Amino acid sequence: MNNKTTMTICLGLIILIQQTSFARSWTDFVKDKGMKPVDSDRISEIFDSKKQPFKDLVSHWQQKEVQEKQIEEYEKYGISKSLATRAVNERLKLAQEVINNNFDNRNISPRIDNLDNRVATMNHIAALGYERFKKLVDKYEMDISDDLYQCLCSSKGIMGTGLKYSPVPDKNCDNTNPCKGGNWGCVSTDIPKEADSWIACAKKYKLADGGNLFQKFDEHVNTSKKFNQDELARNLFERTLKFKKLCLPTMDAQNIDDIQNIFKSSITKKAIDISESSENVCDEAIAVSLYLNSEKRMTNSEAVIEGLLIFALPNTADISDFGTKKLLLEGSLKKILGKNLPIISNVMNLSSTYDLIKRGYDEEKADSQYKEAFKLFQDSKTMTREDLINYEQILKKKTDTLKNLIATSESRYIEQFELAAARVKEKIDIHMYIHKVNYDQETINALLRKFSKEQEKIKHEYENKKAEMLEQYTELSLYKKIISDYRKPLKEKGCDEFIKDRIKQCKEELIRKSRELKLEQG
């Protein structure tokens, strides 16, 4: 790579991170917490509606553990504790002044904005990849030891293969990828782009002068400028439209405002970085979609969980035909108990497969699984076709096993329910046979209430166990989708053919939905 190219890389990096500087208004912090827009044409009403959310946010900032956690996060990036503490205290002071002065529209976070930009810049530098990163450190004559690179490679181990730092072709791999291994033939990859790996390695391995890698970059690159959220959101939305046109996976943003309201600027920025570092539009769309889905929990946990189920299980009926089983149970119990069936209606209220899946998830769990799916998609890029097939088969075997266990648990539960109801009916019939007189209705009600109470406990245990299995099934199905629907087809056909198949599938889905709509309308 010549000097002109190197200079272009460095200039591009500096231009990217040196955007128009501004400190954020207090209303921006309310928006970052995910407050939904207020339906009003009057600005004063919208402004007033944010006062209480902002007060709640300031109360949250005032908690000692919240302040300590934020300071610790800054320290990971080589920012001194004293500087981080001053920034946190400044925001608290200015935020309280806003409240005391009847919510005047002032900036409250100049120092924190600067620190956030330093963090975002370091994340961008970490995501450059080995070749571009090496050119940058050579430009600034930064002496980075091989130990640090080895630490980074070690964090990228794939499927039990330990990776070593080897930037030139070696006995395992005839390529220039910096991280190589060879337990089962050549396995090679670029250095990691995740901040966690860089933070851990930068802390463990100092530069020759004893300084932290992130601190050293801060001497050379101006990180105090604020990136422009409007510009970032517009860029990401334009990419989203491109993904939709090609029928590739994408976040469900209808307009630029959606992106601005849902995601913090640092998240939008990282999504752009992922886009720019992707080799083709297919990798770009899938990686960005997975990453953004992993960050939605910051604003709308319900939307995240719904999205995970749609992403992993577009049709929950393929798990087990529980709806049909439930109808058959209701028919059987109606024959057994007749007019007394309503007395046990509470225990008849069985949760659907879909509801049980949702029961097992909170936003943190969904977020974690999306992060694992994102990592799997990135790491599987270097896997051979045979490795992908083997991994796909392992996931299929596990999901098939879970599906059978779920179906078996349903059948056993329904069978014991019917038998227990039949025993109650037999008790009533035997009394009539022996005493030649029916139980009075109050006694029958008491028998059925006891039955219902016993069955409620059994139902609770059954549904909890089933929810656990469904959660595992959903997670494995998400990972299987990453391999079966994305990575394997891309490896076998390439991006252009993958797009053709996706467009064809979208057209077929549109025709299917159109037919269903016509049938519904008669």
Image (cartoon, rainbow, N blue to C red):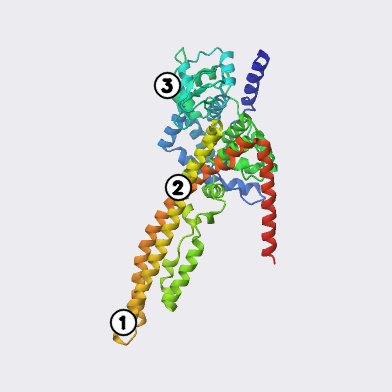
Query: Relative to residue 158, is residue 432 depicted above or below?
Result: below
Instruction: Assign the N terminus to one quadrant of the image.
Output: top right
| Residue that mark 1 sits on | 431
Q: Nearer the viewer, mark 3 or mark 1?
A: 1
| Residue that mark 3 sits on | 204
The image quadrant of residue 66 is: top left
Which percent across, then down, holds residue 328? 48, 68
Q: For the residue carrying disc 1, how many other residues have a C-alpha within 10 Å: few (<14), some (14-19), or many (20+)?
A: few
Callout count: 3
The image quadrant of residue 266 is: top right
- Which of disc 1 and disc 2 is earlier in sequence? 1
Q: Nearer the viewer, mark 2 or mark 3?
A: 2
Which percent across, then down, holds residue 97? 52, 36
Which percent across, then down, holds residue 444? 35, 78
Q: Amino acid at mark 3?
A: Lys
Q: For the residue carrying disc 2, how many other residues have a C-alpha within 10 Å: few (<14), some (14-19), or many (20+)?
A: some
- Distance, label 2 to label 1, CA atoms, is 47 Å
